[in-house]
Image (tube, helix red, strand yellow):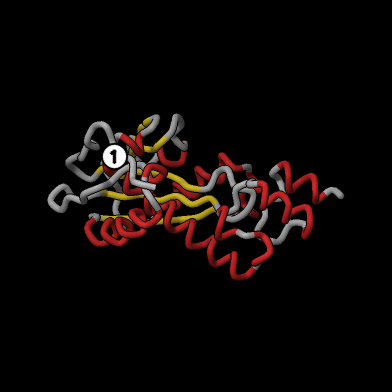
Amino acid sequence: MADKLAKVPLVWLTGPVAGVDEAGRGPLAGPVVAAAVILDPARPITGLNDSKKLSEKRRDALAPEIREKALAWAVAEASAEEIDQINILQATFLAMTRAVTALGQLPEKILVDGNKVPRSLAVLCPAEAVVKGDGTYACIAAASILAKTHRDALMKALDRDYPVYGFAQHMGYPTAAHLEALQTHGPCTAHRRSFGPVAQLSLL
């Protein structure tokens, strides 16, 4: 599938502004992953966009370029176990906070994709939620690409450990094939026990 080009060029910000985004809120298995990126305006990166609008090949090509050219970047996770303990929203916020604090420098401002700013980020420095921010700001788009490629790599590794579930194909999302595998084999340690389809099987 060809990459979908942004209708308007993404906004590049001056100053140390961190874009933050996550990947993996909806799947039934694996961690939720967040990334934080401070881009260098002096080192532009061509083709940044919301990771969902890019092909896997394009994301995989952009990720190392982002890591090379960014002023700072970090990727962090919240595990399936943590998701079950504190719920997916709070686990997402936890992963985001871990990513920002792992940058090694405190940005002047944080831009978070979505409609909510984690309180734990707001106490660090000024922070703003931006709906569809990964298609608006280059720094958030870069974060979305790092989060997505990192999580996909994790799920492919899990596929090697648990091949019966097909994690490399659906990345843990509740596809028909994944649900059928769950019914046949039951959940594994990578599954989120608090998510409906998995919780129902866990009670059987």
Q: How many marks?
A: 1
Tell me the residue at 20%/39% (across/down).
Answer: 13
In the orientation shown, which residue stands out farthest toward the right? Answer: 204
**Left of 31 or right of it: where is 140?**
left
Badge 1 density bin: few <14, some 14–19, many ≥20, Cα 10 Å: some
In the orientation shown, which residue stands out farthest toward the front? Answer: 1
**Left of 14 or right of it: where is 90?**
right
Tell me the residue at 79%/57% (across/down).
Answer: 184
- Residue 53's spot in the image, x, y percent? 38, 42
Question: Is residue 8 something one can see in this rendering?
Answer: yes
Question: Is residue 140 something one can see in this rendering?
Answer: no
Task: Check disc 1 and give the amino acid type.
Answer: Leu
- Residue 147's spot in the image, x, y percent? 42, 52
**Left of 52 or right of it: where is 88?**
right
**Left of 25 or right of it: where is 53?**
left
Tell me the residue at 30%/62% (across/down).
Answer: 64
Residue 181 versus residue 107 in the image, above or below: below
Foreground of the two, 80 or 123: 80
Residue 126 versus residue 106 in the image, above or below: above
Foreground of the two, 164 or 74: 164
Tell me the residue at 63%/70% (across/down).
Answer: 161
- Residue 152's spot in the image, x, y percent? 48, 57
Element assignment for label 1: loop
For label 1, the residue is 5
In the orientation shown, which residue stands out farthest toward the bottom? Answer: 161
Foreground of the two, 193 or 125: 193
